[in-house]
């Protein structure tokens, strides 16, 4: 909640959703200590469709999440607040244009 208060671009539910997606990836990963931006974005896409189906894009947009870059912005807010850590090779740009919301979340 502190993150959502500090940076009001994103609803607290978006932050919790990212955290849930990250937790899911870590459980499935052979390398749970590190998750790439692209892998996390793909897991978040699957999770959103699983949870909300055709409404996935609408739900995410309502929370302020309109692109995969927004996923990265939230991840880097979590890193800043020590909820997670980054590798030296990680970059917020890893989240740029992983996929287009209009294409993958067809409603």
Image (cartoon, rainbow, N blue to C red):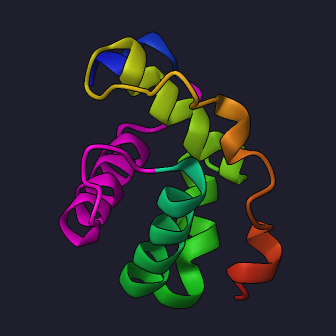
Task: Please tell me whether residue 4 is drawn above or below residue 38 in the rendered image.
Answer: above
State the predominant SS element of the stretch in magenta.
Answer: helix
Q: Residue at x 50, y 88 (%)?
A: 53
Query: From which residue to which does the magenta span run?
Result: 9-35
Please say whether residue 19 is one of the residues in the magenta stretch: yes
Q: Nearer the viewer, residue 88 or 55?
A: 88
Relative horizontal placement of residue 75, taking residue 69 as reference (left or right): left
Q: Quadrant of residue 80?
A: top left
Q: Front-most of 100 and 11?
A: 100
Quarter the N terminus occupies: top left
Look at 44% across and 81% down and name the residue there: 52
Q: Quadrant of residue 82?
A: top left
**Residue 86 visible at all:** yes
Is-magenta flag for residue 29? yes
Query: Can residue 64 be seen by looking at this rendering?
Result: no
- Residue 104 is left or right of residue 18, and the answer is right
Q: Position of residue 23 (x, y in %)?
A: 23, 56
63 with respect to 100 (left or right):
left
Q: How far across and down, in percent of the image, does residue 64 sit?
A: 61, 43
Q: Position of residue 78 (x, y in %)?
A: 37, 26
In the depicted structure, whether residue 60 falls above or below residue 56: above
Most foreground residue, 27 or 101: 27
Q: Relative to residue 87, is residue 65 depicted above or below? A: below
Count of numbered badges drawn on the protein: 0
Q: Residue at x 64, y 41 (%)?
A: 70
Q: Residue furthest left?
A: 27
């Amino acid at each position: 909640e502190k993150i959502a208060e500090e940076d009001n671009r994103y609803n607290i539910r978006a932050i919790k959703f990212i955290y849930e997606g990250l937790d899911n990836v870590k459980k499935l990963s052979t390398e749970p200590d590190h998750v790439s931006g692209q892998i996390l974005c793909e897991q978040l896409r699957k999770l959103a469709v699983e949870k909300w189906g055709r409404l996935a894009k609408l739900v995410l947009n309502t929370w302020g999440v309109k692109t995969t870059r927004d996923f990265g912005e939230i991840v880097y807010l979590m890193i800043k607040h020590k909820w997670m850590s980054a590798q030296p090779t990680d970059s917020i740009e890893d989240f740029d244009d992983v996929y287009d919301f209009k294409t993958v979340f067809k409603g």
